[in-house]
Amino acid sequence: MAKGAEAFRTISEAADELGVAQHVLRFWETKFSFIRPMKRAGGRRFYRPSDIAVLATIRRLLHQDGYTIKGVQKLYRQTGLRLTETFPSAPDSGQAQSPAHGESSARMKAALNDLVAAKARLDRALGHA
């Protein structure tokens, strides 16, 4: 029998629901101070539905939208937990699901070219030519 939507999840249930390993959830707790599952005696974790929503957003930001851990940390500092829970996909992702590999690769190459051009402009402006 499946748990209700409002039921707390153990770490193994949360990991299964999110499609990540348990050690990934424990690692994320060390990197994102806003992940605070309830802990019972002995350190057993229980994730609330709101915790699962935050973790799902982090998973999407890291695995689909291309954010780094530092990028998600910065996003949290800028927007706070409320917006992190409901933060939309990165503007250039175009959809909730990951794009086809070729499209993703082309986007990454275009982004890299933009960054290289921006660095060149910065170097010129700072006299590092």
Image (tube, grey):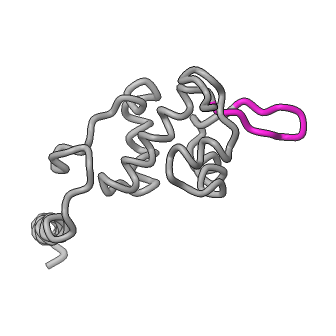
Q: Residue furthest right?
A: 42
Instruction: Indicate the position of residue 17 as horizontal and vertical percent values.
Output: 53, 43
Picture coordinates of residue 70, whole percent (x, y): 44, 53
In this rendering, would 56 be left or right of 101?
A: right
The image shows residue 95, relative to residue 83, as above or below, that is below
Q: Is residue 35 magenta?
A: no
Tell me the quadrant of the picture where the C terminus can be found. bottom left
- Magenta segment boundaries in residue numbering: 38-47
Residue 44 is one of the magenta-drawn residues:
yes
Residue 36 rendering spot, x and y as whole percentages: 65, 34
Residue 22 image-quadrant placement: bottom right
Q: Residue at x 63, y 42 (%)?
A: 13
- Image coordinates for residue 73, horizontal then vertical, percent: 46, 45
Question: What residue is shown at x 41% (from left), y 40% (from top)?
Answer: 57
Query: Quick check: 49 left or right of 40?
Result: left
Residue at image coords 50%, 52%: 19
Q: Considering depth in this image, is 74 or 4 the residue closer to the camera?
A: 4
| Viewer-nearest residue: 91 or 51 | 51
Q: Give the left or right position of residue 102, taking residue 27 as reference.
A: left
Quadrant hosting residue 20: bottom right
Q: Residue furthest top?
A: 6
Query: Which of the 4 image quarters holds residue 8?
Result: top right
Residue 14 relative to residue 40: left or right = left
Q: Could you say which is closer to the camera, residue 18 or residue 90?
A: 18
Q: In which quadrant is the N terminus drawn?
A: top right
User: How many numbered marks does the figure carry?
Assistant: 0
Instruction: Report the residue that reaches farthest toward the bottom.
Output: 129
Q: Residue at x 40, y 53 (%)?
A: 62
